[in-house]
Image (tube, rainbow, N blue to C red):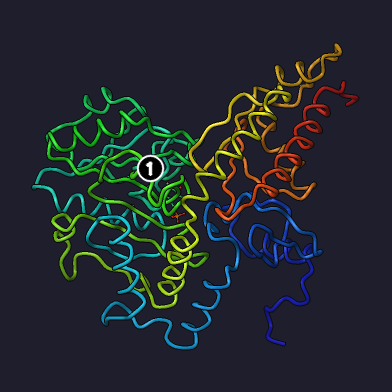
C-alpha cells in the first residue's frame, strides 16, 4: 500500500487526519461524504442525504451526471492538459457555446470564481483610459479571496488581518442607485455587482436598480461587470441572471456550476473590451484545460438539453410556495427570499422565535442568538438534509436544478422537523 493512502473509509479517522494535516480554514460539518448521485450524497456509513448545498451551488446538473462523467472519462483517456500555448478542441467548443448563450463575444478561462473576478478587475483597468482604475462594488457583496477580489468584497469581516488590501476599491449600499452615482469619480473604471448577493444573504438586485446601473455606466463610460459565479448557468431561472433584467453587461464572471463539479472559471466580455487583453497581458496555466473544458461543455449541453434554467424557475416557485406554507405555521421563519433555486430562509431572532413557539410561559433560553441557523443545519443533517447557514439567522438552499417536487416536499418536511426541534429545545428551561 502506498504510504499516505487511507483505506478502507473510516470517517472518524479521516476527520482526525484531515484536521491534523490541513490548515484550519474551514468550519466543516462533521460528515465524510464519499459518493453522490443526482440530488443525493452518501457518507462513509452509507447514510444518504438530500443535498441542498450541492457543492455550494456547483452541482447544478446533479452529482455525477452520466453525460458529465462520460465526458470526463473520455477526455481523461485522451488529453488532460497541454497549457494555453496550444489550441485544444474542448476549450474552443466551450468558448463558442458560452459566447452563443451569453451574447458576450470573447472568453478568458481560469480555474475559480475569484480568479474570474481578478481577471475582470485587470481587464477593466486595461480597457478603460489611463487614470481610470477604481472599481465600485456593493456592501455585503462577495467576490472571492484573492487580494483584489477580496478588496472588491464589501464585507470587512473577510478583510480583517489581511490589510493593506490593494487600493482602488469603493463599496456602496446595494440596491441604492443614488449612492452608486455619488460614488462615481473620474477614476471609476468599473462597477462590479452580483445580480443576487449570494454569500451576503441571498438578496436579489431590484429590476430598476440594475437597469439604472446599466444606464449610469453608459452615460459615464464605465464598464459594468456582473459576478454571476453563483447566479449564472440556470440557478436563478434563466441561463444568466442578467437576462431577467433586460440588460447586457460588459463583462460576466462564471465558475461554480460551470465545470459540473470540476474546477473551471470564466470571464466573458464584449469584444471591444476583451481586445484590451493581448498576448502576455494575462494568463493561466490550467485555465480552460481540456479535462475541465470537456466537463464544462457536457455540463452546458445538459443545462440546455434538459432546460434546467426553466426547471429551476418552476422548482423555485414550488419551493417558495412550500416554504411559505411552512412559514405560516412555523413562527421561527421571518422571510423567504431569492430567485429561482437560489433561496434563503431568514429566521427570527432567537428569543422571539422561541417564545412564540413555546407559548407556554417558559423563559427563553440563554443560548446565544448566533447559534440558531447553525443549530437548524445540524438538526436537518441528523434527519438526512444538507443545508448551510449564512450567518446566525439565514439558511441558504441551493439544490441541484434537477430537484423534483417530491424531493422539495421531503426537504421542507425535514426543515419543519428540524425547526421544531431546535425552537422547542431552546424553550426548555436550562438546567445548567
Ligand atoms: C458571487 C461569488 N463570486 C465569487 C466567488 C468566489 O468563487 P471561488 O470560491 O470559486 O473562488 C463566490 C464564491 O462563493 C461567489 O459566490
**Could you tell me residue 213's position as x and y percent?**
25, 33
Q: Residue at x 80, y 64 (%)?
A: 46
Q: Answer yes or no: is residue 164 visible.
A: no
Task: Tell me residue 345's x, y (percent).
Answer: 60, 33
Q: Position of residue 353 (x, y in %)?
A: 71, 21
Q: Residue at horizontal 82%, vertical 18%? A: 358
Q: Please state the horizontal and vertical placement of residue 28, each as a whole percent of the image.
A: 65, 52
Look at the numbered disc 1 and give the secondary structure of its residue.
Answer: loop
Q: How many marks?
A: 1
- Residue highlighted by disc 1: 163
Mark 1 is surrounded, within 10 Å at the Cα level, by few (under 14), some (14 to 19) or many (20 or more) other residues, namely few
- Residue 270 makes an appearance in the image: yes
Q: Quadrant of residue 10?
A: bottom right
Is residue 162 shown above or below 400?
above
Question: Which residue sits furthest right?
Answer: 431
Q: Quadrant of residue 111?
A: bottom left
- Quadrant in which the C terminus appears: top right
Q: Residue at x 33, y 40 (%)?
A: 193
Q: Nearer the viewer, residue 333 or 401?
A: 401
Q: Residue at x 40, y 52 (%)?
A: 239
Quarter-of-image position of residue 22: bottom right
Name the residue furthest top: 361
Above or below 57: residue 36? below
> Relative to the observer, which residue lies in front, 374 or 175?
175
Horizontal relation, residue 304 to residue 108: left or right: right
| Quadrant assignment for the N terminus | bottom right
Does residue 82 appear left or right of residue 44 in this picture?
A: left
Amino acid at each position: 500500500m502506498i504510504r499516505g493512502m487511507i483505506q478502507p473509509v473510516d470517517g472518524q479517522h479521516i476527520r482526525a487526519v484531515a484536521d491534523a494535516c490541513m490548515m484550519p480554514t474551514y468550519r466543516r460539518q462533521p460528515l465524510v461524504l464519499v459518493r453522490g448521485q443526482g440530488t443525493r450524497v452518501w457518507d462513509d456509513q452509507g447514510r444518504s442525504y438530500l443535498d441542498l448545498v450541492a457543492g455550494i451551488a456547483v452541482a447544478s446538473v446533479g452529482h455525477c451526471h452520466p453525460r458529465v462523467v462520460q465526458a470526463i472519462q473520455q477526455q481523461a483517456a485522451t488529453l488532460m492538459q497541454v497549457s494555453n500555448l496550444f489550441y485544444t478542441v474542448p476549450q474552443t467548443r466551450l468558448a463558442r457555446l458560452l459566447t452563443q448563450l451569453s451574447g458576450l463575444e470573447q472568453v478568458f478561462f481560469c480555474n475559480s470564481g475569484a480568479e474570474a473576478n481578478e481577471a475582470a478587475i485587470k481587464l477593466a483597468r486595461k480597457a478603460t483610459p489611463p487614470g481610470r482604475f477604481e472599481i465600485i462594488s456593493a456592501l455585503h457583496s462577495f467576490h472571492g479571496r484573492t487580494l483584489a477580489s477580496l478588496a472588491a468584497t464589501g464585507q470587512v469581516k473577510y478583510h480583517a488581518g489581511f490589510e493593506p488590501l490593494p487600493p482602488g476599491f469603493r463599496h456602496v449600499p446595494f440596491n441604492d442607485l443614488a449612492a452608486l452615482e455619488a460614488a462615481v469619480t473620474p477614476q471609476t473604471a468599473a462597477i462590479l455587482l452580483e445580480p443576487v448577493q449570494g454569500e451576503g444573504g441571498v438578496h436579489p438586485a431590484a429590476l430598476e436598480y440594475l437597469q439604472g446601473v446599466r444606464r449610469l455606466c453608459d452615460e459615464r463610460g464605465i464598464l459594468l461587470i456582473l459576478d454571476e459565479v453563483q447566479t449564472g448557468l440556470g440557478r436563478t431561472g434563466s441561463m444568466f441572471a442578467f437576462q431577467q433584467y433586460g440588460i447586457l453587461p460588459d463583462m460576466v464572471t462564471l465558475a461554480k456550476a460551470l465545470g459540473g463539479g470540476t474546477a473551471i472559471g470564466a470571464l466573458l466580455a464584449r469584444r471591444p473590451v476583451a481586445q484590451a487583453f493581448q498576448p502576455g497581458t494575462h494568463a493561466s496555466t490550467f485555465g480552460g484545460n481540456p479535462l475541465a473544458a470537456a466537463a464544462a461543455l457536457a455540463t452546458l449541453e445538459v443545462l440546455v438539453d434538459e432546460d434546467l434554467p426553466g426547471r429551476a424557475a418552476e422548482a423555485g416557485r414550488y419551493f417558495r410556495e412550500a416554504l411559505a406554507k411552512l412559514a405560516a405555521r412555523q413562527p421561527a421563519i421571518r422571510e423567504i427570499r431569492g430567485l429561482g433555486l437560489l433561496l434563503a430562509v431568514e429566521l427570527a431572532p432567537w428569543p422571539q422565535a422561541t417564545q412564540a413557539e413555546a407559548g407556554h410561559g417558559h423563559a427563553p433560553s440563554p443560548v446565544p442568538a448566533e447559534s440558531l441557523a447553525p443549530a437548524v443545519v445540524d438538526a436537518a443533517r441528523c434527519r438526512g438534509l444538507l443545508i448551510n447557514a449564512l450567518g446566525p439567522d439565514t439558511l441558504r438552499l441551493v439544490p441541484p436544478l434537477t430537484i423534483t417536487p417530491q424531493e422539495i416536499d421531503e426537504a421542507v418536511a425535514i426543515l419543519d422537523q428540524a425547526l421544531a426541534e431546535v425552537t422547542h429545545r431552546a424553550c426548555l428551561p436550562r438546567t445548567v
